[in-house]
């Protein structure tokens, strides 16, 4: 393979990122998480340099790399760290500010064009829906709340500050504000708000947000039963 000319460092960084991403996944699958984590961090550093050289959209690739990093921590049986990474990634995508992944605050995004808006929305919806869907698989209401609350709390706190660029993002914000009632244990109000949302909000994202909301309604009834019996 011919060497990359020294005067083309940007090309070298691009190729290095492709290599690091593939090799990181290989090390993750073959039981070498330390090397996988190091390769992800290498890619994150490379992306910052690329963003500074006119490829500002790659900040979303950085978020995607953090998504991959969270999966490594889940594989290491460190779910608290994995959920912290995912929730902070979502908070950054919504508000433009990160509390934990502070390197994301160093980015070169200016005015959002249609492509950037779609990149942001797609990544945000993917991480949020995928994580909640995985959390609810084969679990009861109490376990779901226990396992998901730390993930959702920062996201719900950031929801009112969601910087909206298009109607689809407003859909997600309204969805989060309804879900917030569930985590506040206001189950009766939550079911009323969920019913109104499900009746009026258009289906999107392969109907996953609607299906998740319907699952939370079921959980709310399960969690309400002991409260009603005690009353």
Image (cartoon, rainbow, N blue to C red):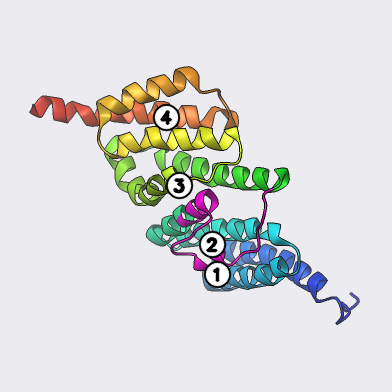
- The circle drawn on residue 140 is none
Residue in front for this viewpoint, 121 or 65: 121
Tell me the crowding category of disc 1: few under 14, some 14 to 19, or many 20 or more residues within 10 angstroms, Cα based: many
The residue to which callout 4 is attached is 213
Q: Which residue is mark 1?
A: 37
Question: Bounds of the magenta span?
Answer: 88-112
Q: Is residue 151 magenta?
A: no
| Residue positioned most to the bottom | 6
Determine which residue is flagged by label 3.
161
Residue for badge 2: 69
**Mark 3 and mark 4 residues within 8 Å of each other at the beta carbon:** no
Distance of mark 1 from mark 3, alpha carbons? 31 Å
CA distance for labels 1 and 2: 7 Å
The reply to whether discs 2 and 3 touch (Cβ–Cβ < 8 Å) is: no
**Residue visible at 45% across and 33% down in the picture:** 175
Secondary structure of the residue carrying numbered label 1: helix
State yes or no: discs 1 and 2 in contact (Cβ < 8 Å): yes
Rendered view: 2 above or below 47: below
**Residue 169's x, y, as percent?**
55, 38
Which comes sooner in the sequence, label 1 or label 3?
Answer: 1
Q: Nearer the viewer, mark 3 or mark 4?
A: 3
Q: Quarter holding the C terminus? A: top left
- For label 3, the crowd category at 10 Å Cα-Cα, with few meaning under 14, some 14 to 19 and many 20 or more, is few
Residue drawn 29% across and 46% down?
146
Q: Position of residue 136 (x, y in %)?
A: 40, 38
Which residue is painted at 63% across and 55% down in the image? 60
> Label 4, label 1: how many angstroms apart (C-alpha)?
34 Å
């Amino acid at each position: 393979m011919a060497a990359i000319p020294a005067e083309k460092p940007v090309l070298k960084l691009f190729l290095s990122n492709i290599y690091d991403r593939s090799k990181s996944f290989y090390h993750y699958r073959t039981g070498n998480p330390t090397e996988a984590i190091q390769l992800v961090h290498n890619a994150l550093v490379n992306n910052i340099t690329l963003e500074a050289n006119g490829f500002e959209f790659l900040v979303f690739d950085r978020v995607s790399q953090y998504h991959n990093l969270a999966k490594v921590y889940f594989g290491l049986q460190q779910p608290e760290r994995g959920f912290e990474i995912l929730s902070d990634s979502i908070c950054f995508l919504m508000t433009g500010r990160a509390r934990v992944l502070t390197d994301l605050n160093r980015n070169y995004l200016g005015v959002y064009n249609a492509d950037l808006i779609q990149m942001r929305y797609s990544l945000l919806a993917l991480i949020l829906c995928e994580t909640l869907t995985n959390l609810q698989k084969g679990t009861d209401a109490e376990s779901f709340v226990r396992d998901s609350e730390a993930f959702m709390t920062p996201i719900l706190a950031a929801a009112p500050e969601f910087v909206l660029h298009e109607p689809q993002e407003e859909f997600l914000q309204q969805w989060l504000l309804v879900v917030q009632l569930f985590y506040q244990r206001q189950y009766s109000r939550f079911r009323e708000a969920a019913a109104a949302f499900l009746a009026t909000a258009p289906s999107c994202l392969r109907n996953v947000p609607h299906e998740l909301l319907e699952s939370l309604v079921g959980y709310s009834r399960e969690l309400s039963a002991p409260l009603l019996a005690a009353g």
